[in-house]
Image (cartoon, coloured by chain):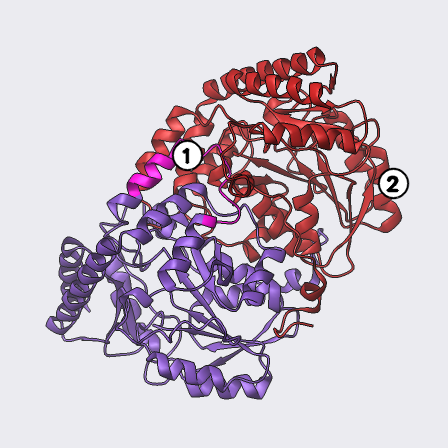
Chain colours: A red, B purple
Amino acid sequence: MSDFPFRPLIEVLPATVPFVGPEAQERARGRPFKARIGANESVFGPSPKAIAAMERAASEVWMYGDPENHDLRAALASHYGIAPGNIVVGEGIDGLFHVAAQLFIEPGVAVVTSEGGYPTFNYQIAGQGGTIHTVPFTDDREDLEGLAAKAREVGARLVYLANPDNPMGTWWDGAAVRHMATELPEGCILCLDEAYIDFAPEGTAPPIDTSDPKILRFRTFSKAYGMAGARIGYAIGAEELIKAFDKVRNHFGVNRIAQAGALAALVDQTYLRDVVARTAAAREQITEIAAQNGLTALPSATNFVAIDCGGDQARAKAILEGLLERDVFVRMPWVAPQNRCIRVSAGTPEDLDLFGKALAEVLREL
Amino acid sequence: MSDFPFRPLIEVLPATVPFVGPEAQERARGRPFKARIGANESVFGPSPKAIAAMERAASEVWMYGDPENHDLRAALASHYGIAPGNIVVGEGIDGLFHVAAQLFIEPGVAVVTSEGGYPTFNYQIAGQGGTIHTVPFTDDREDLEGLAAKAREVGARLVYLANPDNPMGTWWDGAAVRHMATELPEGCILCLDEAYIDFAPEGTAPPIDTSDPKILRFRTFSKAYGMAGARIGYAIGAEELIKAFDKVRNHFGVNRIAQAGALAALVDQTYLRDVVARTAAAREQITEIAAQNGLTALPSATNFVAIDCGGDQARAKAILEGLLERDVFVRMPWVAPQNRCIRVSAGTPEDLDLFGKALAEVLREL
């Protein structure tokens, strides 16, 4: 027991941090990384139009942002052919998970997710006392049937699925995801994290159907739009579901500069297509580097590639540490058997040259 | 009952929005305001150095912000002569209230605040099912003794006090606040909102004492630092208390551009002093305008002034509406007897000239 009047739930929560930031690692190492390709950020940055919009907005930051995020929601609604009432904008997908957990979860409520899936969802569920049930990946993909079966077994209120998936980069086509949602028990919602959807092949996203009460989707400006540091994302769903966010969300929570940048970024679809093409080229370069070094890159529909290091966690970890020592920031999956891999984000050609040289050195030394 | 598996708490929560933004009002009116002096923003804006830092950070926004907010916390720690471990940075004070509610509040937990105090605190408490007990203002000030007595009566876990206060602008000296904290029941924490402290006379803040487990303070870059739209604030308290925020906060939640701007703003104390002086001059101008129109301005230690309109809510509301019609955005307190007033934020001399003319017109017409 602490000296403070925390909720009993908080007393027993570990002080887990889902991810240690690269800056913390740089401070610990005493020197910066030369290639920052570990957090699935977009090294290609946001559209120059978005940067210009953010620069302009900097001097207007004395004003609170519009709590209704009206202009961005209107633009997104028009982009998708849906109504603004089907969209809520929040402080990145993580921020929206925070609110979703508050809407649905109280101690004892069951939630289903993949073992070794994106940890921040679990973190927010645990923060409201939810009980997390996990299903292993199958062949490095999230197990759609297994997730639905587990949801029925435990009477889950939420099921989490990232499609494409993080940390493996694998994916299902939209029809399979849509079918999986129909197999969930009555009153269970599929939280469909589509952070990487812009990089994925046509057909990976189920068609947006705001009359479907079972799917709550999450999208972001952090990945293909290159604005991770701006903290702006959105959820799409049935109107009643989206309206509930207004009961508890921090209405004035979205940064005004981020709103301006996201709007300009959304409009510049030409730039987005260019980033997607450059990201695909980077994935190919990573795949070649892996092959040249006798390792196998997994197919990816994201802006990163999982590389099978051909052994167990210890081997992957040794390679990861060798790369970090050589100033290349990468990460690795956190549970077996996925943790036989390292995870490398799409970099500039220069980033990936550094990575390739460092990888060859590390493997020679092992 | 809805068709969705919300927590029972959420089902019964009203879809209250603490504040309607001026942009929503502008959209409803079909034209912009000419003077934006209703949301206690700083029309003087942030330091030019902070604007430059934010402009520079715009092109780096592809990177997540440092989740530890290391540099800003180090600078704040040095500014206050405390340890970084006594500071948590969050998405504005509202964002920190969101987390604090999650740490301390579950259904049935008692919280004490002033009737008609800052509504966003209550909003976040209600979002976790807390029971709010209120104490009326006395002579337009929050009633310190009454708050402490109520906390003892109901066994409150948290007591909220804004010093200086919003919406009245009144204040207590630090010694009185410190004494009040000692009168709280065992295991009760004073959430001391010091959003406006930079505008207040010396001695308004109790000395910062991080060995005191009873006071959790909240400060922000939204007011005197002119960065409301950046969403960045911080809490100061005992180390164990601050550490608990790491269990549930959105670690990557603070915008990278905001971090850079806040750091530059903090360093430029010369600019801050200038803003405080210009704000004091604006308060005087508002006070004079009130007097010229036969109304009484209350003393204020903030960047706004409550003007007693000399009648009841209906009279204040009529004046407010007349001002809005004349494109002057102001607000008013929400409960009696404070709602005999309107609340006018410090504006530029031009803003206040507009306000003065509009006020005279409105009063002539009434």
Q: CA distance from mark 1 to mark 2?
A: 41 Å
Residue drawn at (63%, 26%), measured in percent from left and top? Answer: A344
Quarter of the picture containing the N terminus of chain A is bottom right
> Is residue A201 in view from this perspective?
no
Toward the viewer: A281 or A156?
A281
Q: State whether residue B314 is above or below residue A121.
A: below
User: Does the magenta segment cover residue B297?
Assistant: no
Could you tell me if residue B155 is visible in this image?
yes
Write the residue at 68% across / 37% down. A192
Residue closest to the far left: B292
Task: State the mark number for residue A248.
Answer: none
Q: Amino acid at mark 2?
A: Ala
The reply to whether the C-beta atoms of the residues labelled 1 and 2 are less than 8 Å apart is no
Does dot 1 land on a helix, a strand or a loop? Answer: helix
Helix, strand or loop under label 2: helix
Question: At which x and y percent is residue B200?
Answer: 28, 70
| Residue at the disc numbered 2 | A149
The residue identified by callout 1 is A261
Residue at image coords 30%, 72%: B169
Is B69 included in the stretch rendered in magenta? yes
Q: Which residues are magenta?
A: B51-70
- The chain letter for the residue carrying disc 1 is A
Between discs 1 and 2, the one toward the N terminus: 2
Q: Nearer the viewer, residue A73 or B111?
A: B111
| The quadrant where residue B178 appears | bottom left
Displayed quadrant of residue B345: bottom left
Return the x and y of residue B210 as percentages of the image width and height: 47, 70
- For the residue pair A242 and B174, the one nearer the viewer reads as B174
Name the residue rendered at 42%, 46% in the picture: B259
Q: Report whether B152 appears left or right of B269.
A: right
